[in-house]
Amino acid sequence: MNSALSRSSRPRTQNITCFWAILLLALTLFLLATFLHVDIRLHTRLLSGEAKGPPVTNVMFLKTHKTASSTVFNILFRFAETHNLSVALPTGSSFHLGYPWLFLARYVEGVEQDGPGLQQRFNIMCNHLRFNLPEVQKVMPKGTFYFSILRNPIFQLESSFIYYKNHVPAFQGAKSLNVFLASPWAYYNESLGLQNVYARNNMWFDLGFDNNAPAEESYVRARLADVEQRFQLVLIAEYFDESMVLLRHLLRWRLDDVVSFRLNSRSQRSITSLTPESQERVKRWCALDWRLYQHFNRTFWFRVGAELGPRQLRSEVALLRARRRELTALCLQDGEPKNDSQITDPRLRPYQAGKADILGYNLRQGLDNETLQMCLRMVIPELQYTAHLYALQFPEKPPKSIPLWGP
């Protein structure tokens, strides 16, 4: 009997064991499939460029000063060149669009002035200018995506002081930025106007506003609302990779379209540290820039949360950085930037200004032509790149006086 019971209960026990094993396996497969579905789909979309709808090809970037904007500039020029898009380039020998004066359409090469509605429209606009919307709209088509970038004014002003030390009257008499900030009105002459725009609220000025205006609450709120109304996105330089991920999503571009190397950056020895007192003084001296930065730092993270969420942001930033490491190993000699004296190809030497030691790159030897062209586009300094695209778009005109590169 016991033997019979034992034999009869064995199938039941085996059935129960089998049921739980199947249930556990099913649950494991479900969770694994869900995880793989999300991540594989995400990674495939990032690498292949899959997106909802075609890429945005009409883009206006307000290139603010000393805000990592040269790297964004390079990204936009590369996109324009590889997709055969037109760029709103400065006329003649110029490399900026009338800065520091308010932008006028006639500062763009190829714009016709024969009458309303006859002006040529361009796909990309990103050279330095002081924003003036009605004139920009004469050059860029309807539906253009407008964006810009801001940097913490403490570090933006420090960079400006080093870079423009020899050109800005307010900086010329000050031994250091700490000295300048201790008594800025001893050096800053408001009547000099455009000569001193780099010395106070320079990002506010680039947006087309009065950099010497009192930081009254009603005025500041009104101008912030103006920026929000016109610009679909304002990036933050301190979170550059996160900014590129968000920009890529909004423009529906591929991962490689926004991968970059840092351009126009300084060596560590030409970066000065500010005392805690000086840092607080910057916030007061550049109060308009400080309010601007605080406001759009908040809205940037709100936008990131709405468009991506923290998990997706982390994953995409990791992929962006991994791809940058791959391209660094592929393109760059020694994998690091070089100072001017170490750059072997004179065509790749960036413009040196003030006391700044601006870094550039050497490319690896032996690259095949296709890889070489891709790597060149990623490291070419902005003056040379402007001259290069100008020669491509306007071959009938005298070239800008910067050595060209490539075919």
Image (cartoon, rainbow, N blue to C red):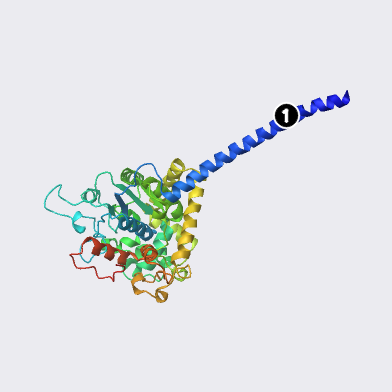
Type of the residue with mark 1: Asn
Q: Residue at x 29, y 61 (%)?
A: 190
* 371, above or below 34, in the image: below
Specify the farthest residue to the top: 1
Task: Find numbered disc 1 in the image and state the secondary structure of the residue it sits on.
Answer: helix
Task: Tell me: 27 left or right of 359.
Answer: right
Q: Which residue is mark 1?
A: 15
Density class for disc 1 (Cα within 10 Å; few <14, some 14-19, many ≥20) is few
State which quarter of the image contains the C terminus.
bottom left
**Count of numbered marks:** 1
Q: Position of residue 43 (x, y in %)?
A: 48, 48
Task: Tell me: 17 left or right of 301.
Answer: right
Specify the farthest residue to the left: 114
Residue 228 visible from this viewpoint: yes
Of residues 278 and 342, the one nearer the viewer is 342
Task: Tell me: 117 left or right of 173.
Answer: left
Specify the farthest residue to the right: 1
Q: Position of residue 49 (x, y in %)?
A: 41, 49
State which quarter of the image contains the N terminus.
top right
Q: Residue at x 11, y 50 (%)?
A: 115
Of residues 189 and 137, the one nearer the viewer is 137
Q: Position of residue 195 (x, y in %)?
A: 28, 64
Of residues 135 and 142, the one nearer the viewer is 142
Residue 274 visible from this viewpoint: no
Q: Residue at x 50, y 57 (%)?
A: 322
Of residues 259 and 236, the one nearer the viewer is 259
